[in-house]
Image (tube, rainbow, N blue to C red):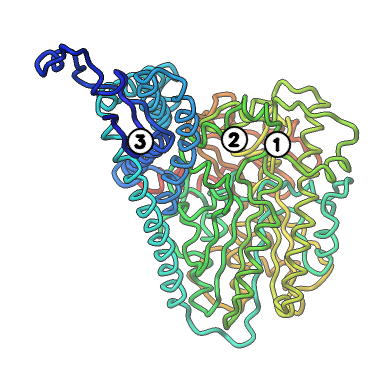
Amino acid sequence: MSLKSPTEVVTEAGAPGASTAEGAGPERSRQAPAAPSARPGLEAAVAIAICFGAAAAILELGVLAYRKLVEHQFVLVNLHAIWLVPLSYMLLLAPLGVVIGIAARWLPARAAGWVAVFLPALVATGSVLFLWYPALHPAAIGLLALGAATQCARTLVPRLPAVGRLAPRAVGALTVALLLAFGGVSAWYVRVERQAASLMGPATAGAPNIILIVLDTVHALELGLYGETLPTTPFIDRYARGGVVFDAAFSAAPWTLASHASMFTGRYPHELSAGWSAPLDDRWPTLAERLRAHGYRTGGFVANVEFTGVETGLSRGFVHYDDVHESAAWVLLSSSLGRFIGNNPRLRKLAGWHDVLDRKHASAVDGEVLAWVDQGGSGPVFLFLNYLDAHEPYVPSAKYWDAFSGGLKRRQDLIRFPNARRGERAFKASMTPAQVEAERRAHLASLAELDAGVGRLLDGLRRRGLLDNAVVVITADHGEQFGEHHLFSHGNSLYSQLLHVPLVVVAPGRVPAGLRAATPVSLRDLGATILELAGIRDPAFPGASLARAWTSPGAPAAAASPVVAEVEPAPREALRYPAAKGPMRSVVLGRYQYIRRRNGPEELYDYTADRAEADDRVHDPSLTPVIDRARLVLDSLGAWGANDARH
């Protein structure tokens, strides 16, 4: 009698009944192996691999839960992880099971059994251990994974016939659990939206719709209306003529979360919990909460799903907040194994793909906004949009790159992801001036493509009648560096390349057209400005409305909030970056920007005449009064850094 099951196993010794004529019971018992190995069939091999993927998912979710709930770490994942992580692992391990099942037909039975258990166990344990990279060296991860996989094989291979029978049933149960998890999470978000909608207050008659557009990673001087000669923003340039352009608007931080948190609360970064390792807490009310209380249907639509996602706390006050990108890449990158594969530099080089795999382009954000608007509802709307197209790695479509490249070639090794775990870009300081210019042009080409997306969005809103009575604000959270002070990217300094951002306010009937405001202003005041334009009097909301730029153009600059910016060192930040040496603050006074580190050196630049801020004038005796005033402003802020503010 041959042994058969759903696993299609066959004992290594052959048919159990095959024995010598002398093979009486005791003799046969002595000759039979104690734990016969088995050859897995295709179904069993796939099911075993999927089960190991599910086990890895449970372990990864456990690690994330421990870090978030026990260690209170900033894990930057939302509840969708409950079903996304298992789905990612199961889909990634299933093909491995197929390969094993096919290969097992040509392998010795015992070897086939070992491969069916050992390889999925090795991949599953290695991917979970990868959660501790770079604290764990790759060699240590490999050795630990080998040990764990070996123990799994020693334990399960002798029981492979039973494992092969149970695994397909387990896959069925896992599929049901996955569907229940998906349904549960979806129902939870529906419940959250309904609760948020129930907090909407009565709307004021004639209240305008408000559209806040944030261009992630855009320096003011990169727009045509601020002097860029390349056609980066033809739509925004034309649109800005219908309102007020602020020539010297400055962000309160050089990176996304801290900058948005300041805009949303009217607070400086040192007053907020939001930081590299902590979300925005509920200590201070947000702009969305205040607008919702006055009858606004609040919708947030973000492309930077990491640092403007739900877990950052920026979603507070929004009835609807869309921070996911429903795509195959979204599923892939949800697991540690998927990130290892998706961000692997060798695989990326082989595929010739250098963009962020799950990047939400402007077209996706626009579609989400218009689809939500089309669902209808009463009262005015507050739409917040974060566009990521201009963020590195800058990978514009061929149409825009051809228009902006000027014949320059890019170094592909400098736009790839060299680190499979963290997905960071290669260090760019080794680039030649021509290569730097190529990077800058790729960034500008991406901005031009984004500009077209902004145009499509506003055209869609106009056709739906939402711009007939509206306030439209276009700004950026921070800028980008291209070799100034030998620095690239953002979040690592406080130079004007990172803080000087565009700011356009268009509101026919409320804001005059064709006006330019030269006085430096802080995006900290954006919330107070929007509330005033919405007709909402909220003295408790901090900041000074920028409406004085058109209602009292001759008002003294002292009426504005101090144009202060702050940054703290990012985790594991390289010491070559200024911010790595300690918290930094800056203040803009007229045409000068003053920068200092806590207990560190001071810098002073004329950012209007010296756009690269290459000439440090901190030792110019004629500017001593400016430096003294700047010191007084920064000293008046008190504690340095978010940690100081919390403790």
Height in image: 215 above or below 531? above
Sequence-earlier tag: 2 or 3: 3
| Measured Cα–Cα span from mark 3 to mark 1 | 58 Å
- At horizontal 68% and vertical 69% (from top left) the residue drawn is 547
The residue that label 1 is drawn on is 481
Looking at the image, residue 44 sits to the left or right of residue 518; the answer is left
- At horizontal 53% and vertical 63% (from top left) the residue drawn is 321
- At horizontal 47% and vertical 52% (from top left) the residue drawn is 312
Q: Are marks 2 and 3 in contact (CB under 8 Å)?
A: no
The residue that label 2 is drawn on is 492
The residue that label 3 is drawn on is 7
Can you give x and y, in whole percent of width and height, for residue 36 in the image?
A: 25, 22
Q: Which kind of residue does numbered mark 3 sit on?
A: Thr
| Measured Cα–Cα span from mark 2 to mark 3 | 56 Å
Can you give x and y, in whole percent of width and height, for residue 74 in the image?
A: 42, 44
Height in image: 63 above or below 113? below
